[in-house]
Image: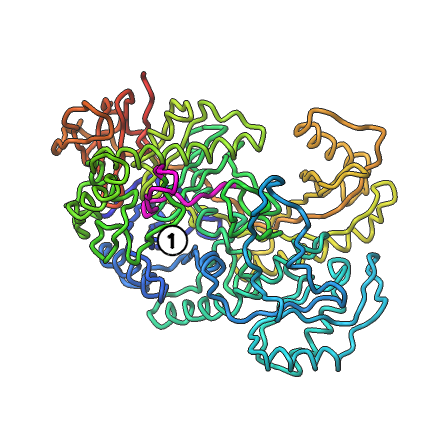
Amino acid sequence: MPDDVTGAPRAPAAMTAATGYSLAVDIGGTFTDVVLRHADGRATTDKTLTTHRNLLEGFFRAVDLALGKAGLGPEAVTEVTVHATTLVTNAVIERRGPPTALLATKGFRDILSIRNEHRYDMFDPQIEFPDPLVPDSLVYTLDERMLATGAVEKPVDAAEAAALARRMAADGVKAVGICLLNAYRNGANERAARDAILAAVPGMEVTLSSEVSPQIREYPRASTTVMNAYTQPIVAPYLAALSAELVRRGFPNRPLIMLSNGGVVGTSVAGAFPVRMIESGPAAGALAASYFAEVLHLPRLLSFDMGGTTAKACMIDAGKPLVAGEFEVDRRYRFKPGSGFPITIPAVDMIEIGAGGGSIARVDNLGLLKVGPRSAGSEPGPVCYGRGGTEPTVTDSDVVLGLLDADRFLGGDMKLDKAGAEAALGRLGKKLGTDAVATARGVFEVVCEQMAGAARAHATDRGIDWRGLPMLAFGGAGPVHACRVAELLECRHLVFPPMASVLSAFGTLVSPVRLDLVRSALSPLASLDWDSVRALVGGMADEGRAALAEAGVAAADATLELGVDCRYRGQQNEVTTDLPLAVLESGDAAALREAFESAYEALYGIRLPDVPVEVVTWRLAARGPLPVANPSPIAGGAPATPRTHRPVAVEPGVPMVPVYDRAAIAVGQKIEGPVIIEERETTLVVLRGWTASVHPTGAVVAERVA
């Protein structure tokens, strides 16, 4: 049965006056989720297993399911079609990219191997880093030189660059990232190298660091450039095929693509810079959490998203997620900054760990129970899926404990093999000296503690007291485990939003069209050339407006938001702060310093008024109008009674637990835990000591009473 949610959020600005349907599809590591939403708030949701060999197969299977339930054809989707995907992340982690080269300045060929010379663990003699996406044999160097001022000391020799391109082609290279010294100040040499390469080898995919990441610091810039080059030959054809298939099927509009920064853009921008899509799906979930923070009047909220492969925690502060200028991909250790690839692309600031429904449980060499980060994914999936999986997972444990009904998974469309799950957990239990149920209970506790630990680390690193924060739980597995995670975080208020299982897909529909741009231009504040800065920011503004125009945002509706990274002279790291555009227009150095020092003091508790300030990087966010949050209250209805009861073994001694259909529960009806509330795509588990009720928005709000 589809979820019909009245009062669901309004769509992005381009759709605020819409009368037709919008479509959102989020491809995750295990499931592909779809939301078909009318402008009046009606929504139909569904999900299907992700088809990793051909993502578009699962994409259109999910779309066909939703359209079929609604009794509609593609022509009804007259508003936006928005897409979030794990395609880029999976390509990097699974190393599915084509042979990719790096072209660096002569003398700097080892930049990917040397990294930044930092050890993320000083006392680990066997420290590990992920292998570079570009092997040493495919690093080439060019005899050129750009000075730190942006002046060309030695231009590119076109003949040398063309000869290197022919060598690359002979070596089987399909894509190349060009990252030349100081190109963030002036990309002329990189552009000249690209022209020469394409003249010699017309089919080569070329990425320039001066376009994808024009920021100071050589290694992060090279890492970002290489990752974009590595994934572009995969993503660009995928987006082209998606657009073509939508047209062939009769969908009226080209798709918009979700980016890591919490905004959507057109396919040409996304295809040229796929590195901006790495945190596409998780960012959409954070934007949906921001919407509910606004609707429920919660100034600060912890977003908890647990899907089939990973769990994500994100702080929502003042109604919006934090956005960081850098993040990491493919970490060797989940809580160890520096153990992955740095990516200097603005992204929603969150922590992500390998703890999802498909996370595999095992016994380590010390005889301890461990869960994840390895996942069964959708192929073969958990043992209970009956698709060939043999290793027990979190979902198998949930089935054995009675949290999930094996006969009603996905509304009964996907029957689960409970006996197979019990057998797999029994085999694991023999290694621990326990039975299948006790082992399943251990898996449940371990994975919940891992997720609570991630949330604690994420909040503490940002100077936020995590104790007692309200929590929003979503994702296919999030509502199953949220109560226990909330208890570990001393949380007393827990929100299960409507469409919880597909909320990341829904989040793309409440995300504004947005593009974040960055330019480094190191200068002492006292001698800042304001005319040069205005020209630099003006160039970013033009690029941002062009991207918004492609996504359908009128020039009059575009908004520009300025930010700047500054530091005290002698420091290594910068602090980012927002800056009114009027400060740039007037050249008010005192106002810029005050903005920086206020942000610095908020982080560190002090100011250094006698130390000169340096301006390092300028940031510009170009965005369309924000979605309007004005849900209509849903009808009250009559109080519901349990549909059935079943035994649940999460806690020893818990009696038969009542099971309710979510759609039947009346607004304001209070239900004491323990209780299970089922909907087609997920299950809400409310433990003993909690009381649940339905909010007028359709969200189930649980409060801890003991």
255 vs 2, left or right, is right
- Above or below — where is 318 with respect to 241? above
Quadrant the C terminus occupies: top left
Viewer-nearest residue: 700 or 57: 57
Residue that appears at 71% across and 66% down: 104
Res. 63 image quadrant = bottom left
**Can residue 175 be seen here?**
yes
Q: Position of residue 449 (x, y in %)?
A: 39, 32
The local secondary structure at tag 1 comes to loop
Viewer-nearest residue: 459 or 12: 459
Residue 626 belongs to the span the image colors magenta? no
Res. 433 image quadrant = top left
Q: How many marks?
A: 1
203 vs 433, left or right, is right
Residue that appears at 65% across and 69% down: 139
Q: Position of residue 338 (x, y in %)?
A: 60, 46
Residue that protrudes farthest toward the left in the picture: 644
Q: Find disc 1 in the rendering and name its residue.
A: 28
Range covered by the magenta-colored residues: 350-369
